Image (cartoon, rainbow, N blue to C red):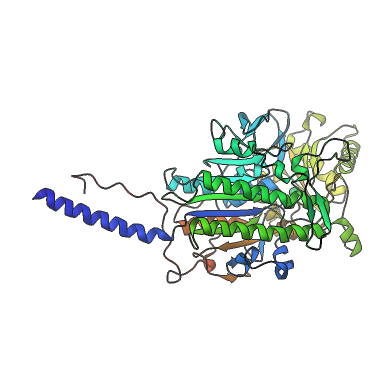
Amino acid sequence: MFRDKLSVLLAALLLSIAALGSAYQASPKLVVIIIIDQFRGDYLERYHQEFGPNGFRAFTDRGAYFPACYFQYASTRTAPGHASIGTGAYSSAHGIFSNEWWDPAQKRMVSSVEDASTKLLGADAEGIGASPHNLLAGTLGDELRLATDGQSRVYGIALKDRSGILSTGYSANGAFWIDRDSGAWLTSTYYMSSAPHWLLAFNGQGSAKKYLNLEWKDSDGTVLGSTAPRDSDGGKPLSYYEMVGSTPYANDYEFDFARELIQQEKLGHGTVTDLLVISLSANDILGHQVGPDAPQMRAMALAMDRQIGDFIAFLNQQYGQGQFWLALTADHGVAPLHATDKHLSIPSDSRTDPEARAQLNKAIGARLHKSGDYVRALSSPIVFVNNEAFPPNLSEAEDETYVAEALKSMGYLGAYTKEQMGSGELAPTPLGHLYLNSYSPYGGAWVMGVPTPFSYAPSGKAIADHGAPYSYDQHVPMAFYGPAFKPGVYREQVEPIDLAPTLAVMLGINKPTSATGRVLTEAIAQRSEAPVPAPPVPRPHPPKEGHP
Ligand SMILES: [Zn+2]
């Protein structure tokens, strides 16, 4: 009798749990964040008429589209950009302020993700691995993993290690990038003890070679590039990264790998939401070589439009319409070419890093009455200060001040020392605010110069660059696609750090630890338009007897 009552009770309970489960169906099977490396926000407008119906237009015409999205910090580079998107916060919170910096302990420049305690996996590639060990903040991926007791799976893909790693965070199941010479896909021992069998098979079956020896042609047949193996101007063979990486074939290669990952790891086929971040690196590699207004950049954007459309079709076929969410953004924009500035009578400074370094040393040497190399490294407009060259009675902060004064004497609009930024001694101006957001405790002693607008340092083949605190470098796309979003064009200014907190609230999870972005509530579909989003929690265990 008692047993019967109990089983009825249990059945009712299970039913109610199942009902709860059905309300949870708003949680997507998979969230895909597409980050395009060096894709300025205005490109979506510039080529809108030429795009097909199912690529970028899924976002701009049928999604929630924010055409005025600007990073509000100064150092607009790849590593800080990806970290900011993942954490919903700026460098002052996540620590990543540059692609590389001086490591006082190792006495050398290090990349933002290299990690001597890890090894590379996936190919014969030698050398140390990479990890998010420098991140000082959690990510959207981390929160998804925490909310589901690790059941949600989180992956990142990019040609560049820093892009897949910093956008996904500490607890990601894997980040994948390519070996620059061979094009083989890699990961590191930070994520797993050995490379997945499917990755080794993918590398082994000539997936990278498929894109060698191809011509890249415009729609009218004009040859825009080639992936035929050849030597660089310096006589060294060009790497896969440079050859294929500067053509749309690199995006094909990344999407090939993304499809393989989705199918092999059965992403989006568990009981909870999975997250995949795909950073398309080719736009940046090409963009540095030709500048934003070259015909190649238009052709790259149109190719990407088709590639993204094909990928959305693949997701539709994998999960069914409305079962996945997409977000689109970029890590930074890019400055117009100096040649363009000249043509339009726009003043800009085209000093190279070696020229600036010589001028810095001259100016500081004159003030200290002692010639020396006062600069450890220059990654314009960041100067890493060589304290050892300065008189020993000066503090690090004083050394930085000498560099800042020298930068101002060289025509920079201003210069902020790490000491000033760290202690909050910045002018309470919009510009000061941008620099405050780019502070980091890493990198030894350094100074950020404030270049005049449109200024950047060309170097070798890289005739275009980014990294300034100005609109052209800060402007990126921001758009969402999926049933949880209210289609429309939202013209209020937003920031890339809004992406993570917005997705977090829609998924019913905590926002990333240090996120300061705004939830873009205006773009969230009302309950009547879409089922209520609910947490992607694993199904609770049935209650045990005696513990109602
Ligand atoms: Zn770049």
* 407 relative to 487 in the view: left or right: right
Residue occupying image coordinates x 64% and y 68% = 53
> At which x and y percent is residue 30?
50, 53
Q: Number of marks in the image?
A: 0
Can residue 192 be seen here? The reply is yes
* 357 relative to 65 in the view: left or right: right
> At which x and y percent is residue 459?
85, 45
- In this rendering, is residue 236 above or below 4? above
Name the residue nearer the viewer: 79 or 121: 121
Task: Check the image and name the residue furthest to the left.
Answer: 1
> At which x and y percent is residue 478?
62, 61
Can residue 191 be seen here? The reply is no
- In this rendering, is residue 13 above or below 177? below
Name the residue nearer the viewer: 426 or 449: 449
* 204 relative to 341 in the view: left or right: left
Name the residue nearer the viewer: 88 or 150: 150
> At which x and y percent is residue 365?
89, 36
